[in-house]
Amino acid sequence: MREDPRRRFTFGFTIEDTEMKLWYCDRSQTVASQPFNFITDHETLIHFFLSLSYASPVQLGWDPTIAIQEHDLQYRITVQSGDGTECVYRTLEVLSKSSASVLHGPGTRVWKAVRVVDGHDYGDPVVLKDCWVSCDRQREGTIHERLRNANSSDAFREAFENMFLTVEQHGDVVIDPGIQRQPDLTPLIMPPEEMKKNGYNIPPVSATLKPRAARSLWREITYTKSRHERKVHYRIVFKEICKSIKHATSLQEVFKALGEICSALKLMHQTGWVHRDVSIGNILIDSHGKARLSDLEYAKDMKDTNDPEFRIGTANFVAVEVQTQQYAFRPLNPPSVSPASDTRSITSDDLAEKRSYLDSAARPHSDSSSDLSISPPLFAFRYNPLHDLESLWWIAVYFIFTTEVANYADLDEKGQDRQLGLDGCVLRLFCDFEERKMDMIDGWDRRFLDRCQCLHPSIRPIGRDLERLRVVLVTTYAQCEANRGSITLEPLEGLHDSIQELFFSISKEISEEPTLAHVLPATNCHPVPRPVQPGSSSHNTASSSGKRSRSDSSDEESATVGNGTPIASTSLSGSRKRARIEREQEESAPRVGMQTRSKTRAQTNNRKQ
């Protein structure tokens, strides 16, 4: 199932001494039989193997809608739309398959593909996404169509087409193309109550991770509704071929994309929709450098009360309130600060005033006053647009804290200490749930600003800008939650534009700053583990980890483009010292002049000796 996209489910057996168990596994569940003695119980043993021997390929779990091309190890995949129309696509290359290694989950695979008509390629390459989704949820293509039709004006349609992907075709996978056209569903072997009663939950492990070990892991976890929910096989085809923001080539490109995504979120929020899964995997950059918001499978109309609320989103970037499923801000009267004001013009006096308010809102109260984190909510928690915007803040924080400008020509002990401090900040910001929570809602002891001291001096001003934005977000949260009986979204007026202006301003400053003009984000070489809430039960997700790639070359000459211009070497503070960024290189990208931190430290130790 991990290696072969044709595998829908699989059977197996295990033997311990004379006891044998039969197993069944799909993207929703793993079921085992009661053990039996295969020496004495011949009937069960023979029945099992004869069933496998006489079963058809479809009954054994193979997908008849995917055919392999053995000469080039690519696939021909049939995509069926709701009206029965079928199109065949030939895959060209794999764009993403990390989710396929997670046993119970969507098993998402994404290919670059081209449509095949009469045995020949037809049209431009497209993106084909194959996944397993909750059968009781709307399909991504349907949500895309509903959102697109939320406003019939030409201006809205044009803006939507520029900010989101274009769906070419989508539909459930139909294994039996007969009259009934039953979709490919995971079977309901046992009632959900029985599965929950007799299932095994692996509790979370509390471990102390060394900073280097923590940074060698990438765990992008998406919360889902239920471990035992039924799933349906689903495919969708998009016209645009894009790259993820995590593969951006500069911080300038990153913040420009974040600013453009503010417009996409504003468009959604104005129509009454929320995205609910804003992450670096869902922010794409097309061939023209334009950012697009993708993965609308969890998007929701806020007026739709039939869709129940549950914890959802990518754990690294999910809003703190969504993580806890509780409103985190006391219903007090906040200081009168307009969130629509220019976030970069906030003065130190403004910050002091806001921190004074946050101090009273976030400090622990006496025993006579119930604590918000443990008291029952006054009204049901609902996802709102501010949570999408907070996810953008976490993405920006992620990029500046996983971006390292290393001065390899003069890496002194102070620089090494700063890098170690940066490791600790990443652990606390993205691994420790309580620390992460307090960094967002806390306002009296400069928690986040203190963490920014670990950043490289040339990146530190961006951290201060993000602190100003954090204060505005927290203040807006308090204003939205001021009424004990309801949530008001009026304070969000103008907030999208203010955040967009801030991100665009940061992008412009980076382009004009010699030190940062060619700084490359290190999102692949410094991944972030998921945050874990202490005492929580195991989530119905698993994680995939990737190892940090290392350059085979120890050459310190800077990589250049065709005209000899350095792409990752700039002057630092007026000197001719080279400023570089560590990043995991794409297979097609040059690997000259890029070093891992371990090699740098080894060279430093050799110089000291």
Image (spheres, grey):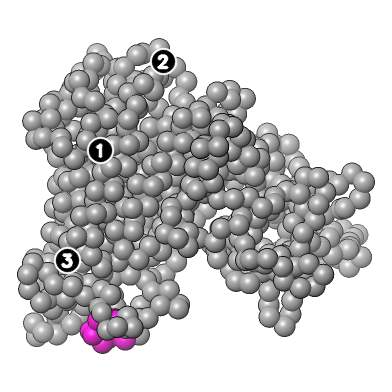
Distance from Cα at disc 1 to Cα at disc 3: 27 Å
Question: Of label 2 and label 1, which has the lower sequence position?
Answer: 1
Mark 1–mark 3 CB contact (< 8 Å): no
Quarter-wise, where is residue 318 in the image?
top left
Amino acid type indicated by mark 3: Pro
* Magenta-colored span: 553-560
Question: Of helix, strand and loop, which one carries label 2?
Answer: loop
Question: Of helix, strand and loop, which one carries label 3?
Answer: loop
Question: Of label 1 and label 3, which has the lower sequence position?
Answer: 1
- The residue nearer to you, when weighing 304 against 484, is 304
Question: Of label 2 and label 3, which has the lower sequence position?
Answer: 2
Q: Quadrant of the C terminus?
A: bottom left
Q: Quadrant of the N terminus?
A: bottom right
Mark on residue 486?
2
- The residue nearer to you, when weighing 34 against 6, is 6
* Closer mark to the observer between disc 2 and disc 3: 3
Quarter-wise, where is residue 529 in the image?
bottom left
Could you tell me residue 243's position as x and y percent? 47, 61
Residue located at (86% from left, 47% from top): 181
* Closer mark to the observer between disc 1 and disc 3: 3
Residue 204 seen by the camera: no
**Residue that mark 1 sits on:** 470
- Image height check: is 137 above or below 28? above
Residue located at (89% from left, 68% from top): 53
Amino acid type indicated by mark 1: Arg
Residue located at (32% from left, 36% from top): 497
> Neighbour class for label 1 at 10 Å: few (<14), some, many (≥20)?
many
- Image height check: is 516 above or below 31? below
- Image height check: is 230 above or below 422? above
**Residue that mark 3 sits on:** 514
Distance from Cα at disc 2 to Cα at disc 3: 49 Å
